Amino acid sequence: MLLDAETHSEGFRANRRARQNALVEDYVELIADLLDEGQEARQVDLAERLGVSQPTVAKMLIRLTDEGLVARKPYRGIFLTDAGRTMAEEVRVRHRIVESFLLALGVSSENARIDAEGLEHYVGLETLDAFQLAMSAGLVDFMAIARGTAGKK
């Protein structure tokens, strides 16, 4: 059954918003990861880890600076502003929940990490809450029973 136009279009609008934010969130999260590991966040590091060219990174850094998410200091790399740090933490939380949920379903560690990297940008708060609830309610044990591996090592 076809939904009414307003309800139908909301899903597409949400998807477009998420797609627009995904790239920004990936950059901010990576910068936070580098800084938290005690490394400098430099343009060359971002390009290498994201698999893009340095000019692509340079353009995004201008955008991130304009949006107040990063600060750049000559000869000192890239730093997150308070807004950038907040965004990075929100993305990390979403990522951890999605990855944990996928692992609970029995998805391999590698695929859960890769898939969570994409899904984290598109999952809404209600869905994240449902993922958390399912895990808290024993999803791991349920899946082990469903796979017939409960109690086996």
Image (cartoon, grey):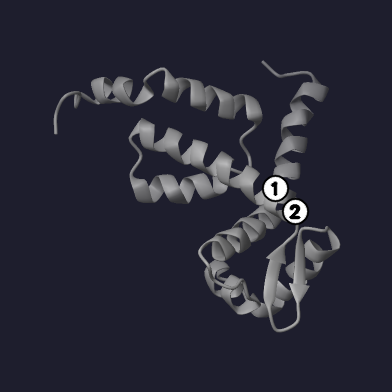
Q: Position of residue 53 (x, y in %)?
A: 63, 77
The image shows residue 133, relative to residue 48, as above or below, that is above
Sort mark 1 into few (<14), some (14-19) or many (20+) by Cα contacts within 10 Å: some
Kind of element beneath mark 2: helix
Q: Residue at x 57, y 41 (%)?
A: 93
Specify the quadrant that holds the N terminus.
top right
In this view, the residue in front, 70 or 17, is: 70
Q: Residue beneath label 1, please? A: 86
Q: Residue at x 75, y 26 (%)?
A: 8
Left/right placement of residue 53 relative to residue 63 reads: left
Q: Residue at x 82, y 23 (%)?
A: 6
Q: Residue beneath label 2, please? A: 82
Kind of element beneath mark 1: helix
Q: Position of residue 121 (x, y in %)?
A: 63, 44
Q: Position of residue 144 (x, y in %)?
A: 26, 25
Q: Kindly indicate the quadrant of the structure image that contains residue 103.
A: top left
Specify the quadrant that holds the C terminus.
top left
Q: Amino acid at mark 2?
A: Asp
Q: Kindly indicate the quadrant of the structure image that contains residue 147.
A: top left
Residues at marks 2 and 1 touching, judged by CB atoms closer than 8 Å? yes
Sort mark 2 into few (<14), some (14-19) or many (20+) by Cα contacts within 10 Å: few
Left/right placement of residue 132 relative to residue 72 reads: left
Most distant residue in the right direction: 66
What is the spatial separation of the Cα atoms under label 2 and label 1, in whole angstroms?
A: 6 Å
Q: Residue at x 54, y 74 (%)?
A: 48
The image shows residue 96, relative to residue 66, as above or below, that is above
Q: Position of residue 102 (x, y in %)?
A: 42, 36
The image shows residue 15, relative to residue 78, as above or below, that is above
